[in-house]
Image (cartoon, helix red, strand yellow):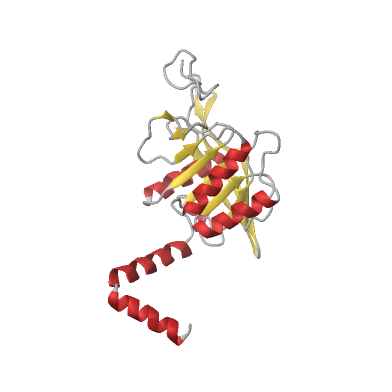
Amino acid sequence: MSAQLRALRQLIAERFPDAALLAERDAHRLASAVSTGIPELDRAFPGQGLPRGKLTAWAPEGGAAAVLRAACRAVIASGERAAWVDGPRTAMAGWTGTDHSDTPWREWSEGMPLVIHPSDRVSALRCAELLLKSGAFALVVLDVLGMAPRAEPMGTETVRLARATREGGGAFVVLTPSGSMAALRVAAKLDPHGVRWRRGPWGEPALPAEARIEVRARASGWNAAARIVLPVAPYDVRCALEAGPDRRNPGRVP
């Protein structure tokens, strides 16, 4: 650090002490990783969490969506914001959502991440880029798998998203089997011998209660694994006659 820069920082600290403290706090925030809320998993990542300002490629199987939903809630519980760009429109009910016309399809709930339902993959990529550039979100998750014609960001699209991630300083996770330009690659698989079952009336296995997931994280000079246990919540398929948004067509309300 040059003498002029040190003198300038000292002058700012003397003239604007509150601003100096804010700058130091912001620098500390950007230097720290984004915790997933699962200590065993955080320890498997190079920075003890999802890296800020960098792209993370997470393979879309083995409980990836469940872990990332938990990470979104952990981010919000820590006082920051999280967003999920839900291309295939499979986000859990109860999360905030907007359709391509920016019309909320469900009332916003405190403590939940922002969920956006884009109309096509191009809109999904643009939404993700804007969210990342804003710097207002500690964690942005992009899920465009299942959207036609090419689901994943490719070529210059990946470059733009990586640049936006660096500018905004948040953590960016793409659900994708490939890891182009990713600083961190994560893959998970279900341990078939690690499922604990709820028993039925006659003592037979009826419903899964917990599932053990094996997670592998890879980065430059880093290769680590973690085993985590996730609770399995029962999910009842919505009846078409129930009031509220129809999940078969999120834009239609019966």
Residue in view at x 69 percent, y 47 percent:
154
Question: Which residue ends up furthest to the top in the rendered image?
Answer: 241
Q: Where 88 sits versus 160, above or below?
A: above
Residue 52 visible? The answer is no
Residue 124 visible? The answer is yes
- Percent from the top left, x then y, of residue 19? 32, 68
Q: Tell how many labels.
A: 0
- Percent from the top left, x then y, of residue 200? 49, 22
Q: Where 238 sits versus 55, above or below?
A: above
Residue in view at x 66 percent, y 45 percent:
153
Q: Would residue 254 be found to the left or right of residue 220 on screen?
A: left
Q: Would residue 41 be found to the left or right of residue 181 on screen?
A: left
Residue 219 figure quarter: bottom right
Viewer-side residue, 102 vs 97: 102
Residue 94 figure quarter: top left
Question: Which residue ends up furthest to the front in the rendered image?
Answer: 101
Q: Where 1 sits versus 238, above or below?
A: below
Residue in view at x 36 percent, y 51 percent:
79
Residue in view at x 69 percent, y 53 percent:
180
Q: Would residue 42 be found to the left or right of residue 27 on screen?
A: right
- Percent from the top left, x then y, of residue 175? 61, 43
Viewer-side residue, 171 vs 121: 121
- Percent from the top left, x then y, of residue 171? 52, 54
